[in-house]
């Protein structure tokens, strides 16, 4: 699958999950034990907002601290929709995928950055889904694209403590469960379990 199409699908799935959050679910726990639903969604919205200037060639210093703190405001669903729409425009602008972006880890090909964002949207979209009791199945083609990319990244993510280790799934588990486990998620996670 084309990277930009996989990225678009991951954005759409994430927003689909966010749109299902009811007013009473924003403080519910998620598989990210330190984050409730609102904190998790704010994290992804912040990533989406960062992607716009970074993909346009801005540096981290140029962005500064303007994206610190709460990015959701009084209408978190509308904020998430708007951030995802702007992120998609930035990612799909002609020539963007061929650029180099400045990340905290250094200069990075934009295609690599989009792979990271693809996985971020998929995994955190699943986090939201299971936290609120929504359907947790992810787009299998987008999952496949993320899994292929992450297979070459997992050691670096683990050595930098970006994912938890030790989650095991049966060898015959599907690709989504293997991807979730690689990102330190228990595919059977449920609130209160």
Image (tube, rainbow, N blue to C red):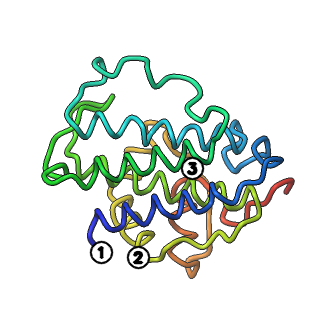
What is the distance, in whole Å, between disc 3 and disc 1 at their CAs?
A: 28 Å
What is the distance, in whole Å, between disc 2 and disc 1 at their CAs?
A: 7 Å
Q: Residues within 10 Å of mark 3 (few under 14, many from 20)?
A: some
Instruction: Give the residue number, with chain letter if any, for mark 3.
Output: 165
Q: Are marks 2 and 1 in contact (CB under 8 Å)?
A: yes
Q: Are marks 3 and 2 in contact (CB under 8 Å)?
A: no
Query: Which residue lies at the image location 18% right of the left edge and 49% below the top edge?
Result: 96
What count of labels does the image hold?
Answer: 3
Q: In the image, residue 1 lies at what x, y percent?
A: 30, 74
Left or right: 172 in relation to 12: right
Which of the two residues, 45 or 131, is positioned nearer the viewer here? 45
Query: Which residue lies at the image location 28% right of the left edge and 35% below the top edge?
Result: 54
Instruction: Give the residue number, with chain letter if any, for mark 1.
Output: 1
Which of the two residues, 74 or 152, is positioned nearer the viewer here? 74
As displayed, is residue 5 above or below residue 76? below
Instruction: Give the residue number, with chain letter if any, for mark 2.
Output: 141
What is the distance, in whole Å, between disc 3 and disc 2 at their CAs?
A: 25 Å
Q: In the image, residue 77 lies at what x, y percent?
A: 62, 48
Query: Which residue lies at the image location 24% right of the left edge and 30% below the top edge?
Result: 106
Left or right: 95 in relation to 129: left
**Nearer mark to the viewer, of 3 and 1:** 1
Q: Secondary structure at mark 3?
A: loop
Task: Please give the label number shown on residue 64.
Answer: none
Q: Secondary structure at mark 1?
A: loop
Q: Secondary structure at mark 2?
A: helix
């Amino acid at each position: 699958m084309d990277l930009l199409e996989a990225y678009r699908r991951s954005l759409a799935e994430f927003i689909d999950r966010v749109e299902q959050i009811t007013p009473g679910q924003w403080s519910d726990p998620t598989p990210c034990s330190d984050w409730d639903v609102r904190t998790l969604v704010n994290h992804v919205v912040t990533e989406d907002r960062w992607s716009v200037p970074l993909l346009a060639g801005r540096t981290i210093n140029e962005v500064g601290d303007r994206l610190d703190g709460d990015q959701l405001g009084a209408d978190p669903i509308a904020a998430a929709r708007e951030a995802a729409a702007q992120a998609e425009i930035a990612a799909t602008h002609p020539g963007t995928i061929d650029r180099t972006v400045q990340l905290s880890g250094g200069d990075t090909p934009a295609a690599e950055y989009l792979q990271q964002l693809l996985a971020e949207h998929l995994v955190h979209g699943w986090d939201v889904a299971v936290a609120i009791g929504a359907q947790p199945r992810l787009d299998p083609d987008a999952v496949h694209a993320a899994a292929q990319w992450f297979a070459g990244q997992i050691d670096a993510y683990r050595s930098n403590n970006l994912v938890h280790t030790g989650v095991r799934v049966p060898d015959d588990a599907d690709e989504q469960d293997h991807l979730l486990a690689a990102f330190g998620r228990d595919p059977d996670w449920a609130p209160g379990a």
